[in-house]
Image: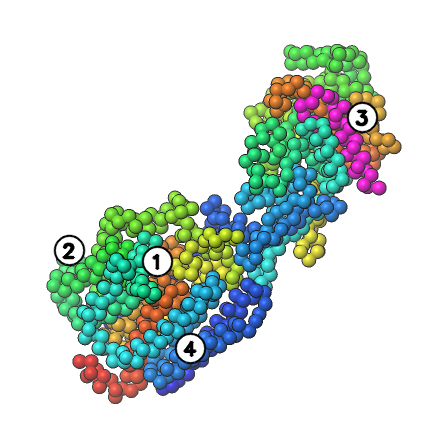
């Protein structure tokens, strides 16, 4: 039973070593001498991970052994990169890492019976939508680059979209668990396309509406895309009907096209994506320099702390928003295509573990919850990496666990906590067949 | 639902594959094109972070060096030229905002230590920082100084001195000079000076009518083609009719039947015009092209800063099949334009027994550890004339200096071979509408029996003749170089 946790512990050691080596690399570049500081940072990091590991050993002994080491690895990469950009930012990031783990522990502590979330699903949904709205509220809302992403209450500033994604996934998982059969059974074929029954179509339109709403009022193309894609992923998994996904996508494209024509902010984002060279010094500057930074990296990259982020001798950014939006470009620049492949592979492994958890889970809600959480995580990574590589328009979404930003780290640790909760139960049931019935009964 | 979950995962694998695909495209496959985009300032900014190597004169005088400014990621190097205007040509300048020119541009890769693809990957893996190589040039610091100060006294013009046996460029001076240190502050002003055109390297970009100095080429073609021998004579009256127009000697002097040395010593127009016609256009162009005409001279300067010499029509040199007034071409007129570099190459080829070496400014590349990575391996460009022809031409050119039109080039105790030239350039706009409209030339080499240096000197917009203003520059520069050789 504890062999899962032993594997976790074993996996954490190379992660801590990697962080130590990363810091050592940055130090070596910046001061040409190696102090023991990197060892100290490595030790702190390992101690924090170890404490979390011990907590998991006690609370969730059966949970997936690789998920936590993988996200610890992502955090380590993020800490090193952010440190390389700015020491002060890295200190914030380290604090948020610890805060994230505290919330992670609290989530595990209080949501052991996570079915309770189902009971409050409408409350959670409303809460999630309110969070999304908050940045538009006068007094606390903040506008960043034309998008309303931030909220500031007193000294605390955060990005509510990061938290509302959890709320929306919980709601959707619960709603679809209950209605998936009706959606399938009541479906009719019209003109060769399978349409869900009108009555149950309503909630789908609500989600679509919410995504469009985000486009227009929050002007957040990235979050909008992320939410809607997660919704379609869940809808597909819940109903098995690919046609629903096609309809949903058509709806999104039509809506996005309409708003791209009418909402200047969205329109600009798409214009910049399609024609970045039209104004390389102004609107196209960020995406072009994101790509130029990647071109500069090549196969192996320039090495830690070797890439240019600002124009030497000035404060003018050469790679704008290097610590958040374009951190992936910086990674390609310094670690090369190989480093980037490694990073994408880690995201893929996290996704694989998340879906594995969903596969193992026995009840519908657990399955859909794990699927939804994993999908939203993977799609978030896709939206921002795709943004900085010009696969899709560049939007201000964070790269989970790597980008600088407290809301992102904390919210994503809660996401991982939920996945581990689902995993622990699924794997316990798998190893203790006797317990399965009891839990299944409890679920009913 | 498990089937759908697996399909969803497969879809996400595809999405992530697309990300890797795009990343590969930008970082590897399209990287070269992206680095060349105008909007991409990164390559320039990064080059600025490499300590660019120094450029040195043959005696070790520092011509260009890089000064570090800022620290860490703010570190950048700025180019300094301690000798100011003296080496503005041919070394040029290198600044991030204004780009680079001349020698700095041509040797950029060596100066920033750009290695082969394989070596740079090796360096990246071993974490070696890219550092620039120093380049030692062939330039004789003292002679360069003499050449430029003589030119500044005489007028706009240029001097090129080449070691005949190696092609080593020992002097390349151009007046008006400019101070490369002032490029960042004064670029706009430097560009606007239309008359002085200080950024123009007159040695390689000055297209001047060569006047009588070209008679050496005509003589070479005559001897090579067998049209004449040193002993054969051509009747040279006071004037002849060439292409329907009179072509005359100075003061219409009638020389009668004369041999080559006499004709060259006294620069007899009617002799050479007839010789040119005798040789024919094919042979004339053949010899010219072997001397380097109608092509970009093979020097280590950017192609667009080294102009072709030849007969110009609509901004281009024309070939042997285009109609040409052969008689006037033979005496350096027609639409013939020649750079001082080309004229120095003519002198150097004759001095080197008929073998033209590629002129080169660089001598060796020294890496940051002090090792010589590469050094100049003298290379033959062509063999325009035989050793015998070269000897015969040398004898004739010795007469020019000892008793002919170029006596001011004489150096005591050293036998000098040379040829003067004075092309009249009436209405030359470059002269600013003044009356001083001669293009004065001297080309030659010394010592005549064992040439150490071949030089072309020219002064534009002067009232004086080649012997008065160009020959003394030749003498001063040759003396300085020969003194340095001892």
Q: Position of residue B86 (x, y in %)?
A: 69, 38
Host chain of mark 2: A
Q: Which residue is mark 3?
A: B408
Q: Nearer the viewer, mark 2 or mark 4?
A: 4
Tag 1 and tag 4, C-beta contact below 8 Å? no
Indicate the quadrant where residue A240 lies. Answer: bottom left
Q: Position of residue B268 (x, y in %)?
A: 76, 18
> Which secondary structure lies at badge 2?
loop
Question: Would you call the spot at circle 3 few (<14 residues within 10 Å), some (14-19), or many (20 or more)?
Answer: many
On-image quarter of the C terminus of chain B: top right
The residue depicted at 56 percent of the width and 25 percent of the height is: B314
When the figure is inspected, residue A85 is found, relative to residue B333, above or below; the finding is below
Q: Nearer the viewer, mark 1 or mark 3?
A: 1
Q: Which residue is mark 1?
A: A396
> Which secondary structure lies at badge 3?
helix
Q: Which residue is mark 2?
A: A191
Magenta: main secondary structure: helix
Question: Would you call the spot at circle 2 few (<14 residues within 10 Å), some (14-19), or many (20 or more)?
Answer: few
Q: Which residue is mark 4?
A: A49
Indicate the quadrant where residue A144 lies. Answer: bottom left
Is residue A418 or residue B162 the one in the foreground?
A418
> Which secondary structure lies at badge 4?
helix
Q: Is residue B456 left or right of residue A30?
A: right
Question: Which region shows up in magenta?
Answer: B458-486
Measured Cα–Cα span from mark 1 to mark 4:
29 Å
Q: Position of residue A245 (x, y in %)?
A: 23, 61
């Amino acid at each position: 039973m504890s062999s899962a946790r032993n594997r976790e512990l074993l996996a954490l050691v190379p992660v801590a070593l990697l962080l130590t080596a990363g810091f050592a690399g940055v130090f070596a570049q910046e001061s040409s001498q190696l102090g023991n500081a990197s060892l100290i940072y490595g030790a702190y990091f390992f101690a924090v991970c170890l404490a979390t590991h011990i907590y998991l050993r006690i609370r969730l002994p059966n949970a997936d052994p690789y998920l936590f080491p993988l996200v610890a690895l992502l955090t380590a990469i993020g800490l090193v990169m952010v440190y390389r950009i700015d020491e002060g930012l890295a200190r914030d990031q380290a604090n948020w890492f610890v805060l994230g783990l505290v919330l992670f522990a609290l989530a595990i502590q209080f949501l052991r019976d996570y079915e309770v979330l189902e009971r409050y699903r409408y409350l959670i949904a409303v809460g999630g939508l309110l969070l999304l709205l908050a940045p538009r509220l006068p007094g606390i809302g903040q506008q960043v680059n034309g998008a309303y992403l931030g909220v500031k209450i007193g000294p605390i500033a955060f990005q509510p979209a990061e938290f509302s994604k959890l709320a929306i996934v919980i709601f959707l998982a619960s709603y679809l668990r209950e209605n998936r059969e009706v959606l399938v059974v009541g479906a009719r074929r019209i003109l060769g396309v399978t349409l869900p029954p009108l009555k149950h179509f309503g909630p789908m339109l609500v989600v679509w509406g919410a995504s469009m709403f985000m486009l227009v009022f929050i002007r957040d193309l990235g979050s909008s895309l992320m939410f809607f894609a997660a919704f379609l992923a869940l809808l597909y998994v819940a109903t098995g009907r690919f046609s629903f996904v096609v309809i949903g996508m058509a709806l999104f494209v039509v809506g996005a096209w309409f708003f791209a024509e009418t909402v200047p902010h969205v329109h600009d984002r798409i214009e910049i994506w399609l024609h970045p060279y039209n104004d390389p010094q102004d609107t196209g500057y960020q995406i072009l320099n994101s790509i130029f930074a990647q071109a500069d990296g090549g196969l192996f990259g320039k090495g830690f702390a070797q890439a240019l982020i600002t124009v030497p001798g000035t404060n003018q950014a050469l790679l704008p928003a290097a610590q958040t939006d374009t951190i992936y470009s910086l990674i390609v620049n310094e670690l090369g295509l190989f480093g980037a492949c490694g990073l994408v592979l880690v995201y893929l492994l996290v996704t694989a573990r998340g879906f594995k958890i969903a596969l193992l889970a026995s009840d519908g809600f657990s399955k859909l919850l794990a699927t939804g959480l994993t999908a939203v995580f993977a799609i978030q990574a896709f939206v921002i990496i795709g943004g900085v590589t010009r696969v899709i328009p560049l939007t201000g979404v964070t790269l989970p666990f790597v980008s600088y930003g407290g809301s992102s780290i904390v919210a994503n640790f809660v996401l991982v906590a939920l996945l581990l909760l689902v995993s622990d139960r699924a794997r316990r049931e798998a190893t203790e067949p006797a317990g399965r019935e009891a839990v299944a009964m409890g679920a009913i | 639902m498990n089937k759908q979950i697996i399909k969803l995962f497969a879809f996400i694998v595809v999405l992530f594959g697309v990300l890797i695909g795009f990343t590969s495209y930008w970082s590897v496959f399209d990287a070269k094109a992206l680095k060349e985009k105008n909007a991409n300032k990164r390559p320039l900014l990064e080059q600025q972070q490499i300590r660019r190597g120094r450029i040195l004169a043959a005696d070790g005088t520092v011509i260009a060096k890089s000064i570090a400014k800022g620290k860490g990621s703010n570190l950048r190097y700025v180019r300094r030229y301690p000798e100011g205007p003296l080496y503005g040509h041919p070394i040029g300048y290198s600044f991030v905002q204004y780009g680079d020119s001349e020698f700095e541009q041509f040797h950029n890769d060596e100066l920033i230590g750009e290695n082969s693809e394989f070596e740079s990957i090796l360096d990246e893996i071993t974490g070696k920082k890219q550092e620039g190589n120093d380049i030692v040039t062939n330039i004789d610091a003292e002679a360069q100084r003499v050449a430029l100060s003589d030119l500044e006294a005489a007028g706009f013009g240029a001097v090129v001195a080449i070691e005949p046996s190696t092609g080593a460029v020992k002097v390349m001076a151009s007046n008006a000079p400019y101070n490369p240190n002032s490029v960042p502050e004064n670029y706009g002003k430097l560009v606007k000076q239309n008359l002085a055109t200080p950024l123009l390297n007159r040695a390689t970009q000055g297209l001047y009518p060569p006047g009588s100095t070209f008679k050496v080429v005509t003589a070479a073609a005559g001897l090579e083609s067998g049209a004449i021998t040193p002993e054969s004579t051509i009747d040279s009256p006071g004037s002849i009719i060439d292409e329907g127009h009179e072509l005359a000697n100075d003061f219409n002097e009638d020389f009668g039947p004369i041999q080559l040395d006499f004709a060259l010593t006294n620069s007899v127009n009617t002799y050479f015009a007839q010789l040119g016609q005798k040789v024919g256009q094919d042979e004339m162009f053949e010899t010219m092209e072997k001397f380097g005409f109608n092509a970009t001279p093979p020097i280590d300067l950017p192609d667009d800063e080294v102009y072709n010499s030849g007969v110009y029509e609509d901004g281009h040199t024309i070939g042997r099949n285009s109609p040409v007034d052969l008689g006037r071409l033979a005496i350096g007129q027609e639409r013939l334009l020649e750079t001082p570099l080309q004229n120095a190459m003519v002198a150097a080829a004759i001095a080197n027994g008929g073998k033209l070496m590629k002129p080169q400014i660089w001598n060796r590349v020294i890496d940051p550890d002090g090792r010589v990575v590469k050094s100049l391996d003298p290379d033959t460009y062509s063999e325009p004339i035989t050793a015998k022809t070269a000897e015969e031409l040398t004898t004739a050119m010795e007469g020019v200096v000892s008793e002919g039109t170029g006596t001011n080039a004489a150096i005591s105790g050293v036998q000098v071979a040379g040829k003067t030239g004075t092309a009249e350039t009436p209405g030359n706009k470059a002269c600013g509408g003044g009356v001083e409209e001669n293009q004065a030339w001297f080309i030659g080499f010394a010592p005549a029996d064992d040439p150490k240096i071949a030089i072309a000197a020219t002064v534009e917009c002067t009232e004086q003749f080649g012997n008065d203003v160009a020959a003394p520059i030749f003498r001063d520069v040759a003396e300085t170089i020969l003194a340095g050789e001892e």
